[in-house]
Amino acid sequence: MMERKPLIAGNWKMYKTSAEAAETAKALLNLVADVRDVDMMIAPPFTALAAVSEVVKNSNVGLGAQNFFWEKEGAYTGEVSAPMLVSAGCRYVIIGHSERRQYFGETDERVNKKIRAALQAGLIPVFCVGESDSERESEKTFYVLDKQVQNGLKDFSSDDLTSLVIAYEPVWAIGTGKTASSIQAQEVHAFLRTLIEKKFENPLANSLRILYGGSVKSDNIAELMAMPDVDGALVGGASLKAESFARICRF
Ligand code: PEP
C-alpha cells in the first residue's frame, strides 16, 4: 500500500487580527521547526494572509485560505479569487466547510466550481464533507456523503485530482467537543476511499489524503491517526493556540 504523508491543517475561522495571526504563526514555527514527516497548514482569515505569508514563507508550514469565489476577477464585490490567494502566498484552500454550507448558502454545485477553479490556479483543495446529527441519527450518513462527493467531484478525471484532499467533518462533531470515535472515523474514511476508487479507480483512491475534522485535540489525535484510512486532521478550536496545534502536529 502506498504511503500517504499526513497533513495536519488548522482552520482559524473568523479569529485573530493580522498581528495576532502573525504572532501565533511565529510561535508555531518555533515549536514545529524540526517536524519533517507531516505536512502542516494554517488557514487564517483573509485579512491576515499577507502577514502570515511573510512569517511562514520558506518554512515547513503551508498557508491556506478558508474560502474564495471561483471567477478569476470581475465585478463581485466582497469576493476574493483563487489567483489572488496564490499571489497572497496560499498553497491550500478549504472548500465546502460545513459552516459555509450552513450559513452562507454553499451548495455542492458551488463546491464543484470552486474545486475546479482552485485546481486551475494550482491550489490544493481541502474539500469538506460531512453529515449532520439528524442525518446520522436517521442512518443517512453514507447517502449524504455519497451525494456530496458525487456532486462535488462531478466531471473531473482522476488526473485532475492528484492533489485533492478530502476532509471528513461530521457536523455534529465540529466545535462541540464531541469527537467521532476512531472506529466511526475509520468506517467513514474507508467508505470515502472506496467511493473514490469506484468513481476514479485505484491510484487516486490509494494516494488520496482523507483528513478527519471535528473536535480534534492533542489527546485524541494519536488514536485517530492510528486508523489506516485517517491521513491527517482538519483542526478548528485547537489550532488557535500554537502550543496545542504543535502538539497535534507532533501526534
Ligand atoms: C473545523 O472547523 O473544521 C473544525 C473541525 O473545528 P473544531 O476542531 O473546533 O471542531
Image (cartoon, rainbow, N blue to C red):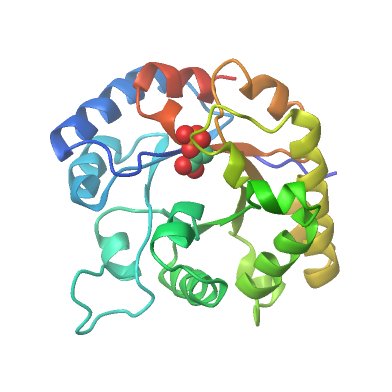
Q: Residue at x 29, y 44 (%)?
A: 14
Which quarter shows the N terminus?
A: top right
Which quarter shows the C terminus?
A: top right
* Residue furthest out toward the left: 19
x and y, in percent, of residue 146 in the image = 75, 65
Is residue 6 something that shows in the picture?
no
Numbered label tally: 0
Is residue 130 something that shows in the picture?
yes
Q: Give the answer, above or below, for where 136 lies relative to 121.
A: above
x and y, in percent, of residue 234 in the image = 53, 40
Splitting the image into 4 quarters, where does residue 217 fall? top right
Q: Residue at x 48, y 61 (%)?
A: 101
Position of 91 with respect to 180 (left or right) is left
x and y, in percent, of residue 215 in the image = 55, 30
Q: Give the answer, above or below, for where 225 lies relative to 48.
A: above
Splitting the image into 4 quarters, where does residue 181 fall? top right
Position of 59 with respect to 235 (left or right) is left
x and y, in percent, of residue 26 in the image = 26, 26
Q: Give the answer, above or below, for where 31 lies relative to 238.
A: above
Position of 133 with respect to 109 (left or right) is right
Nearer to the camera, 29 or 48:
48
Q: Residue at x 60, y 54 (%)?
A: 165
